[in-house]
């Protein structure tokens, strides 16, 4: 599936949630989608949590 198609599906889900349940429900759905994406990237091995934590702490290293 292309990035454009995925973006369209995500946008449609958020729009339908906003219309049906309101703004705060839409934010909750968006947060859950983001958490799911992070977990998926981690499981696939494409996200290094140690690197993310180091970047948030201000450590600048390239490995």
Image: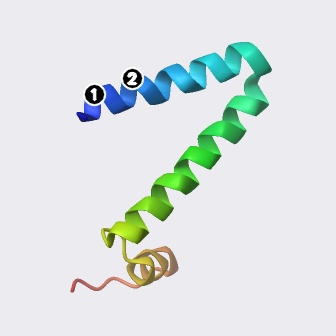
Quarter of the picture containing the C terminus is bottom left
The image quarter containing residue 4 is top left
Residue 9 locus on image (x, y percent)? 43, 26
Secondary-structure class at tag 1 = helix
Q: Are marks 1 and 2 in contact (CB under 8 Å)?
A: yes
Q: How far across and how far down the image is residue 27, in percent? A: 68, 36
Q: Which residue is mark 2?
A: 8
Q: Tag 2: Cα neighbours inside 10 Å, few (<14), some, or many (≥20)?
A: few
Q: Residues within 10 Å of mark 1 (few under 14, many from 20)?
A: few
Q: Is residue 55 left or right of residue 31?
A: left
Dividing the picture into quarters, in which one does residue 7 lie? top left
In the displayed structure, does residue 60 sit left or right of residue 49? left
Query: In percent of the image, x 43 and y 74: which residue is there?
Result: 52
Q: Is residue 30 left or right of residue 19?
A: left
Say which residue appears at 58% left-offset and 26% top-offset.
14
The residue wearing badge 1 is 4
Vertical placement of residue 8 versus 57, above or below = above
Q: How many marks overall?
A: 2
- Residue 50, given in percent of the width and then of the height, sits at 43, 84
Residue at far top of view = 19
Query: How far, Cα to Cα, is label 1 from label 2?
Result: 6 Å
Where is residue 42, by image quadrant? bottom left
Secondary structure at numbered mark 2: helix
Residue nearest the viewer, comparing 53 with 35: 35
Name the side, left or right, on which 52 lies relative to 33: left
Q: Position of residue 1 (x, y in %)?
A: 25, 35
Residue beneath the point at 70% across and 13% down: 19
Give residue 45's mark: none
Q: How is the image coloured?
A: rainbow
Name the residue: 27% across, 35% down: 3
């Amino acid at each position: 599936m292309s990035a454009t198609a995925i973006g369209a599906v995500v946008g449609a889900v958020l729009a339908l949630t906003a219309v049906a349940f309101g703004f705060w429900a839409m934010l909750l759905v968006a947060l859950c989608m983001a958490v799911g994406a992070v977990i998926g990237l981690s499981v696939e091995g494409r996200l290094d949590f140690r690197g993310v934590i180091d970047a948030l702490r201000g450590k600048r290293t390239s490995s």
